[in-house]
Image: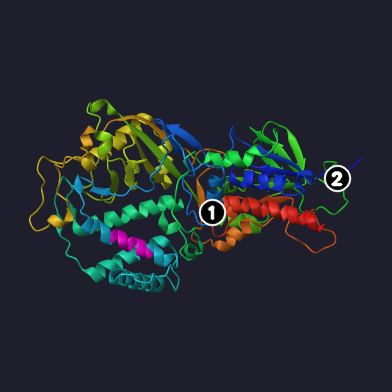
Amino acid sequence: MGAKKPRVVIIGAGMAGLTAAHRLYTCAGSRDLFELCVVEGGTRIGGRINTSEFGGDRIEMGATWIHGIGGSPIHQIAQQIHALHSDQPWECMDGFLDLSKTQAEGGLEVSPCVVEPISTLFKLLMDFAQGKLLEDGASSEERELHNLAAEAFRVCKSNNGGKVLSIGSFLRQGLETYREVVKDQDKEVQGGRGNWRRRSLEEAIFAMHENTQRTYTSAGDLETLDYSAESEYRMFPGEEITIARGYSSIIESLASVLPDGLIQVGRKVRRIEWHPEVHQGMILGNGHSNDRPVKLHFCDGSVMSANHVIVTVSLGVLKAGVSEDSGLFSPPLPTFKTQAISRLGFGVVNKLFLQLDPAHDPKGKSFDNFPVLQMAFHRSDSEVRHEEIPWWMRRTASLCPIYHNSDVLLSWFAGEEALQLETLTDGEIIAGISSTVNCLLSQPEEPQVKSGTPELCNGNVKSAHRFVGSDVKFKKVLKSRWGTDPLFLGSYSYVAVGSSGDDLDTMAEPLPRESHEISTSPELQILFAGEGTHRTHYSTTHGAYFSGIREADRLLQHYDSV
């Protein structure tokens, strides 16, 4: 009777898990090397990739963008399977929509001459934090802002004991330094019902960009986002695009080569039992020899043993799993691993889709007119804020069609606002969005622009292309619920203040740790993959992909060397 093949069980059928399975199954000779199984707690494959449809358009409930096409393995797969073209409209099929319109609370349309300097400032501050150098041919304004960013860094470092702790503190210092340099008069701005002053308007525009950054990073508060790790994060060069046939086409391609039955859905793991101190040849307490030292206990009561388990669950699930009352791992993970899990950040980002109702506009032209709306709000503690705008909208940066002339609109939410969105009924969401849009886009009959300050607002309130806020009605809504889904408990990882890129490396370390002692436990019992285990590409699908390749190769190299 031949020796049993090593059994590899992969927990999670998302990008990392299916990439690892694909690699282990397709690599030369490995089909006969392993007994392979993927167990998925949910009823579908894909994890945080979930393509859906809404209003006749293809949309993404989770991962949306290929972040740079130069060298991206996701883009390469999408090209190979011809997923970049479709006859059906899809989300962001014409890229990032430009010609945005910035509306301030109370109906003030903000002039580009106010928006653009603050937008440029924010971009230059983020470029500085990410370690990007000024390009040859940079304008004098860009060089001045780069020097301003350097001064903001110096001040921020001086004020915090020689270290800049967070992206949030650096950005705020950058805005303060800008104000000290520019020294614009704090003029009163009138138009609509805004009661704005120049400086509060600039701050609202700056906050708008901060809120966009929150959705990029999943950090609910940029004060919790570590500054030093920002320069380690890597993007691929080239344009950012969405996938015409949907992100799920990548998942389906990876899964298509695997035999039927290899992926088992509806198999949620309750406990992972491993043996960090088993000596070669000894018998485990459960009567099994250590040739398959890991036991998976499932919620349905079944048990499966394995030589190696690749854990690809989200960092959110790991955070819950290492809590004292969870017992996901038995015995608990070693301290070095649990501390890394605890220190790293894992936030919530949700998407909200709304379909415009054409019933109110018999001419059917409203969809052509709805703007790429950037939203600037008064501070939540401001006495002049409009009470009809719900608190969960006040840190939402934009509302715009998913492509030009689409009747489906999209808005992004992060942090507490994203969690609140999950608790609201469709009716409550429609009421809140409608009130917000009405407050932003409704205008009095005549522009109320104070003499001497017309440059602060456009004042063009009777344009034939205006989309009047009170005209907006919504037909239906669709939202993601990543924060409360027990299979994810959030969206993606970030390096929090108090953590570092070293913790991401620690996340990738297999268990038990390598030992040179003669009496050691079986190696590579638990391996870890997923976006939260990649030092330079965390929070991305390609980071998850790379991690799946990494752990599959770790096993292939292990058996090549034994």
Q: Position of residue 115 (x, y in %)?
A: 25, 56
Quarter the N terminus occupies: top right
Q: Specify the label residue 289 is tagged with.
A: 2
Precedes in sequence: disc 1 or disc 2: 1
Identify which amino acid the numbered label 1 is placed on. Answer: Ser
In the displayed structure, 441 sits above or below 184; it is above
Taken as a whole, is the magenta stretch helix, strand or loop? helix
In the image, is 38 to the left or to the right of 533? right
Q: Specify the label residue 469 is tagged with.
A: none
Q: Which residues are magenta?
A: 118-125
Instruction: Say few, some or many: other residues with alpha carbon within 10 Å of mark 2 (under 14 / 14 to 19 / 20 or more).
Output: some
Q: Position of residue 467 (x, y in %)?
A: 22, 38
Mark 1 and mark 2: span between their CA atoms? 43 Å
Based on the displayed image, in which of its 4 quarters is residue 164 positioned? bottom left
Q: Closer to the camera: disc 1 or disc 2?
A: 1
Q: Position of residue 313 (x, y in %)?
A: 60, 45
Foreground residue among 356 and 279: 356
Identify the secondary structure beneath mark 1: loop
Quarter the C terminus occupies: bottom right
Q: Is residue 200 visible?
A: no
